[in-house]
Image (cartoon, helix red, strand yellow):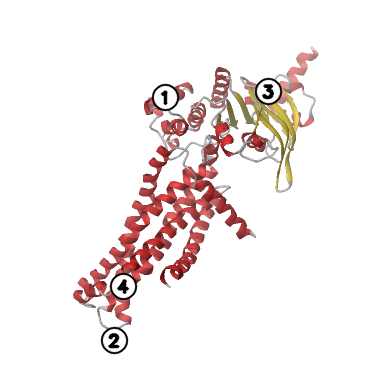
Amino acid sequence: MIEVKNLYKSFDGEMVLKDISATFESGIINQIIGKSGSGKTVLMKSIIGLFPIDSGQILYQERNLPNMNRNELKLLHQEVGMLFQGAALFDSMTVIENVMFPLEMFSKKSKQEMIERARFCLERVNLQPDTVSSLFPSEISGGMQKRVAIARAIALNPKYLFCDEPNSGLDPVTALVIDRLIEEITQEYNITTIINTHDMNSIMEIGAHIIFIEKGTKAWEGSKEEIFTANNEALEDFVFASNLYKKIRKTQQKTKNN
Amino acid sequence: MLGLDTLGRYVVLMKRTFTKPDNWRMFGRQLPREMVKLGVDSIGIIIIISIFMGAIMLMQTILNTESPFIPRYSNGLILRDTMLLEFASSIMSLLLAGKVGSNIASEIGTMRITEQIDALEIMGVNSANYLILPKVIGLILCMPVLVTLSVFCGLLGGLGITVLTDMIPMADFIYGIQYAFIPYYFTYSIIKSLFFGFIIASVSSFYGYYAYGGALDVGRASTNAVVNSSIAILLMNIILTRILLT
């Protein structure tokens, strides 16, 4: 579980995040949603510790991240897996080397054990190790890169998983596959997962706990079931931006009236 | 103020770079790779440039010092000392700043903008140490070999002129390059190259590490790396010459 309390963050005197408080439970998908530029990426990077915050608390099971020294932060990061928007695989390494990288860096496993673990992780994300292991990231599709990145993120059995717009650049079918994969892994290993997204399909598919960020503040909090009925103007603008969701709302209203 | 800010960030980055590696086995694997990429892969260009510069410098010296009062063997001596004192260390380092420096800055800069450095940090890896230390140590270890090779090739270029032209007899040239040899000049050249190797790798890494934005910004970081490491090499050259030769 991760708890964020009264988080403030500014860049060059300009306040980007204001008084954000939230609790992210383990075993479910927590989503941070909002328009581009609303501050959701800054919030995620602040929670991970990539951006130092101005004030507030970020508690990883009672361990307050802003108070950690470099060594404590390093140890915490070994419990964290992250899926970046562009996958962020290491170009100079093959797929199997990418997945093995955290193991080689921090585990005391033998080479054979590391290979076995990496192959297991690749299989877990529905990739064939025999086919993809020796390929470089530039030789595989965007969807496969995302899966390899998930395999790398889970290689060390993380307690916390962060995903920054995992669906960006993917077709709707592959996006759905990635979403479900993240959800399965979260439930299977009871991970605290936080996903940063503005993809409504993803929100409606896996969003168990959603935080809506608007102009650097937490404007709404709830679940995907509550999102259509939320009485929040900014959230409505966000959710019903597309005609598809406008139609869904109309249908829901009709059903309700009948 | 901007200069001081940049210098401060450079010092902080170097402090993070020069720490114990997170994993010695990984460092041991990275180091030879970097030595090949930065040093061994530069051998070709160093051989070509040194041979041609040695040849042209000897020709220019002969053409501009034709006098009955100046012994002909002095042309060999001048070429040897020029290669040893300045060309093999300083000029070759400026060339390497262009070739190796831009390579380092663009590699690390691309890793930065594609979030690969963030990925390292998230895993708990000291990215500065993991990426920069093998490059710095690798280039420093390669520099003495490259300098020695450059001196040798420069003299070989001069020797080629004695064979291919009648500008200077080979015997005079051979006598000249051995005459009044001061071994300390070689030591001086090697010491300088170690400092220059550090400057090229660390300054270029610095500009790559703090690159942000897109492809244009990586290009800008690469240019800044070459320009600033060249300036740093020239400044350091003056300081080291003052300390080591006067």
Question: Label 3: how many residues lie within 10 Å, few (<14), some (14-19) or many (20+)?
Answer: many
Three-letter amino acid code of the residue under disc 4 = Leu
**CA gap, disc 1 and disc 3:** 32 Å
Residue wearing tag 4: B79
**CA gap, disc 3 and disc 2:** 90 Å
Is any atom of residue A36 visible in this view? yes
**CA gap, disc 2 and disc 4:** 17 Å
Residue wearing tag 2: B67
Is residue B126 toward the left or the right of residue A45 in the image?
A: left
Residue A216's x, y, as percent?
A: 73, 37
The chain that hosts pointer 2 is: B
Dot label at residue B77: none
- Between B36 and B185, the residue placed more toward the observer is B185
Three-letter amino acid code of the residue under disc 3 = His
Residue B5's x, y, as percent?
A: 62, 56
Three-letter amino acid code of the residue under disc 2 = Ser
Residue wearing tag 3: A209
The chain that hosts pointer 3 is: A
Q: Say whether mark 4 and mark 3 are on the same chain.
A: no
Question: Label 2: how many residues lie within 10 Å, few (<14), some (14-19) or many (20+)?
Answer: few
Residue placed furthest toward the bottom:
B68
Q: Hey, which quadrant is residue B179 in on the image?
A: bottom left
Q: Earlier in the sequence, mark 1 or mark 3?
A: 1
Q: Say whether mark 4 and mark 2 are on the same chain.
A: yes
Secondary structure under the numbered disc 3 in the rendered image: strand
Dot label at residue A119: 1
